[in-house]
Image (tube, rainbow, N blue to C red):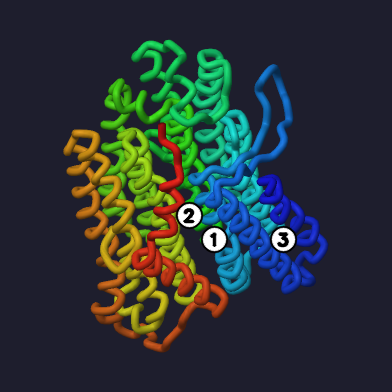
Amino acid sequence: MNPLWALVPPLLVIPFIIFFGERRRNLREASIIIAGIVLLGINDRIYSAVKAGELVESGELSLLANFSLRLSAEPMGVLFGLLASFLWVVTTVYSIGYMRGHDEQNQTRFYCCFALAIACVMGAAYADNLLTLFVAYEAITLSTFPLVTHAGNDASRKAGRLYLLLLMCGSIGLFLPAVIWIATAAGTLDFRVGGILSDSGMSQLSVGVLLGLCVFGVGKAAVMPMHRWLPAAMVAPTPVSALLHAVAVVKTGVFTLLKMVTYTFGIDMVSTSGVANVVLPVVAFTVIASSIIAFTKDNLKARLAYSTISQLSYIVMAALLATTMSVTGGALHIVMHAFGKITLFFCAGAIMVSLHKTQISDLDGMGRRMPVTMVCFFIGALGIIGLPPASGVWSKLLIAGGSLEAGNAIWLAVLMLSTILNIAYLLPIPLRAFFKPAAPGQSVDVCEAPFASLWAIVVTATVCVLLFVFPQPLIELLGLIQWR
């Protein structure tokens, strides 16, 4: 099985999206769903091959000396590919209800850019070396920029400029020099078990500086102060917010750091040298500070945006703790957070389309008008908090265990404090929707989300519960990773 096939469905569907356009939008969106199902099937074939111990790789495109573009499949990438392809289908179905219900303009352009972004994500998921991953990382930034500026108003253009400025400056100014430094020190950019820098002879100071360049240069991971683009991008339509927060952009950021810690630095080098101790306090600060800021936001999407910043730093922290348990927990949290957070964003978009409300303070009594949506919001919130019967429990337990395995309980305390803050800023939303009386004169008629959107919301909320009950397949897949 050649991983290049994973790029074909999202790229091949783009001409069909353009051909069908706005006049035949049912065919346009049907073609996207078909492409998504085909892509999911391809990723499932790759998963089966990797699980059977087969070598899954593409040919290479040589660029300079021994540096080339090449794809191959390993367990962490397979997990990311399966996640992105499944959520592409679900988000497309959701978008049908949202984009039509909200009467959004330029829907054909939206779906084209979305498909292109998914193709880039597949390139990142199956990158065989750091050069390929860097190229895919940059392509994701460029392909999602038109989605951030989709509305075409002053606010979206301003958000788009900030989005492009922070991500491109971070990647070109910090991440690219780190890639060049690694290539010079190790003589290769290939991902290898145990890391390629372990025999490079670099000093501890040099490795620490290099690690810092990677953490802050990968701006999609949103470690403070490289986080500002993320809440600014919330001016985009809700399906774009879901794409940014659960499918493509931020998950590529933390996935990149996990891959580099595992296969470029090597978890033994990071854990034994202590170089991560300089960066970990900044990551811990991001976890707590963004949770506190989320608590102060009345705008629902803004609160969810700062929640995402905090949750991403869980994964960065897991990578920097550099134990088998913590990195496994970080990779698992990519999936668990994705389903919880996409459910919350789907619900936020449904509330805006159906009730035209965006502020949390206006949601009193809204649970009676949108009971299914708000129940799903409650499940998604439990997933983010890490409480049964939602999926976030397992990944958080693994990260917590990894902090103890690393011999430093202070990071466990950070996770516990953040979890308390998660409860404080998420649970009051469904509680006030169900148990506070509606404002005088407020309609009490049931007004659920459009059917397509509601279907997607129910699917992602259901998966949150299923991943709590049946986490074994994901844990078994991650158990195939060779750490050393």
| Dot 2 crowding, Cα within 10 Å, few <14, some 14–19, many 20+ | many
Q: Quadrant of residue 362?
A: bottom left
Q: In this view of the protein, which residue sits in the foreground, 283 or 226?
A: 283
Q: Secondary structure at mark 1?
A: helix
Residue type at mark 1 is Leu
Q: Quadrant of residue 391?
A: bottom left
First in sequence: mark 1 vs mark 3: 1
Residue, disc 1 = 87
| Dot 1 crowding, Cα within 10 Å, few <14, some 14–19, many 20+ | many
Q: x, y percentage for residue 170?
A: 50, 29
Q: Is residue 239 left or right of residue 15?
A: left
Q: x, y percentage for residue 353?
A: 51, 72
Residue type at mark 2 is Ala
First in sequence: mark 2 vs mark 3: 3
Please report contact status of discs 1 and 2: CB closer than 8 Å, yes or no.
yes
Q: Is residue 252 left or right of residue 2?
A: left
Please report contact status of discs 1 and 3: CB closer than 8 Å, yes or no.
no
Q: Residue at x 58, y 37 (%)?
A: 137
- On residue 108, which mark appears? 3
Q: Residue at x 63, y 49 (%)?
A: 117
Residue type at mark 3 is Thr
Residue, disc 2 = 246
Q: In this view of the protein, which residue sits in the foreground, 273 or 386?
A: 273
First in sequence: mark 1 vs mark 2: 1
What is the spatial separation of the Cα atoms under label 1 and label 2, in whole angstroms? 8 Å
Above or below, 179 against 20 in this view is above
Above or below, 179 against 410 in this view is above
